[in-house]
Amino acid sequence: MRVLSDGIYYACGLTLAGLALSYFLNPWAGVPLYVLALYCLYFFRDPDRTPPAGNVIVAPADGKVVSVRQLPSGETRVSIFLNIFNVHVNRTPIPGKITDIFYRKGKFLVASHEAASSENEQNTLVVEGQGTRVVCRQIAGLIARRIVCYKHAGDVLAPGERIGYIKFGSRVDVLFGSEWDAGVKVGDKVAAGTSILAIPRLKQEAA
C-alpha cells in the first residue's frame, strides 16, 4: 500500500526527534514520537480501489454518512464525515471533465456538524460527465487545516480517480440533481471510489 508523501515526511521528522530524545535523555523518551510516526504512516495511507461498473455516483471519501438532505434547489446533498482513522484520499464521484474549481476560506467547525457544509473552509469541484453534473466539496474540520487538490479546471477524470485529500478529521459533500436517487442513508459507512451513493432514477423505477 502506498503512503502519501506528507505521511513520510511527518514520520521521518517524528522519528528523528524521537531518536534525539532517546539519545540525550533515555531510551524510552522517544517512544511516544515513534508511535506518532507510525500513526502518520497509517493516516496517510493511499490504498488502490476498483470502482463499480455502470452509470453510478460513488462515494468521494471514506467515512460515515452524516446527512442526506434535499435542498431548495432540487438537488440532493450527501455529507460524509471522515474521522482520524479513515483513509483521507478523496476520489471523483463520477468520471468526466472538471468544469470549475473554486476555493473559499471559512471557519473550522466540527466537520460532523451541519453548519460545516456552509461555513467551513472548503474546496469545490464541479464534474460533468455521463450526461449529468455533480458537485464534490472538500471541507476542512476542527483539526483539518489543509485541503489538498491535485486537479484543475479542464482535467478529465477516470472513474474513481484520486482528486486530493484533507489532513486529519474532515467532511466531503456531494450534490447531485433530481435525475439521481440516493442509495445511502444516515449512519451508513462508505469507501471512496467503491461505495455507490446514488443510481439513476429512471433505472431504479424501471427495476
Image (spheres, rainbow, N blue to C red):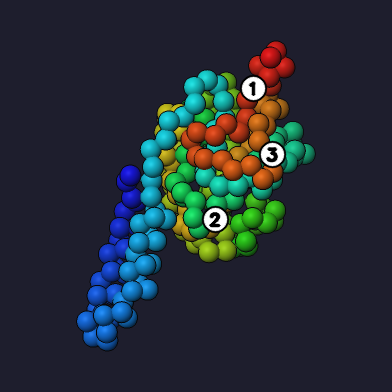
> Between disc 2 and disc 3, whose residue precedes?
2
Q: Amino acid at mark 2?
A: Asn
Q: Kindly indicate the quadrant of the structure image that contains residue 39.
A: bottom left
Q: Callout 3: few (<14), some (14-19), or many (20+) C-alpha neighbours within 10 Å?
A: some
Spatial CA span between label 2 and label 1: 29 Å
Residue 80 is at least partly visible in this image = no
The reply to whether dot 2 and dot 3 touch (C-beta < 8 Å) is no
Q: Kindly indicate the quadrant of the structure image that contains residue 11.
A: bottom left
Residue 89 is at least partly visible in this image = yes
Spatial CA span between label 2 and label 3: 18 Å
The residue beneath circle 2 is: 83
Q: Amino acid at mark 3?
A: Lys
Q: Callout 1: few (<14), some (14-19), or many (20+) C-alpha neighbours within 10 Å?
A: some
The x, y position of residue 49, in whole percent, is 42, 35
> Between disc 3 and disc 1, whose residue precedes?
3
Q: Nearer the viewer, mark 2 or mark 1?
A: 2
Q: Which mark is residue 200?
A: 1
Q: Amino acid at mark 1?
A: Pro
Identify the image quadrant of the N terminus: top left
The x, y position of residue 6, in whole percent, is 34, 57
Q: Nearer the viewer, mark 3 or mark 1?
A: 3
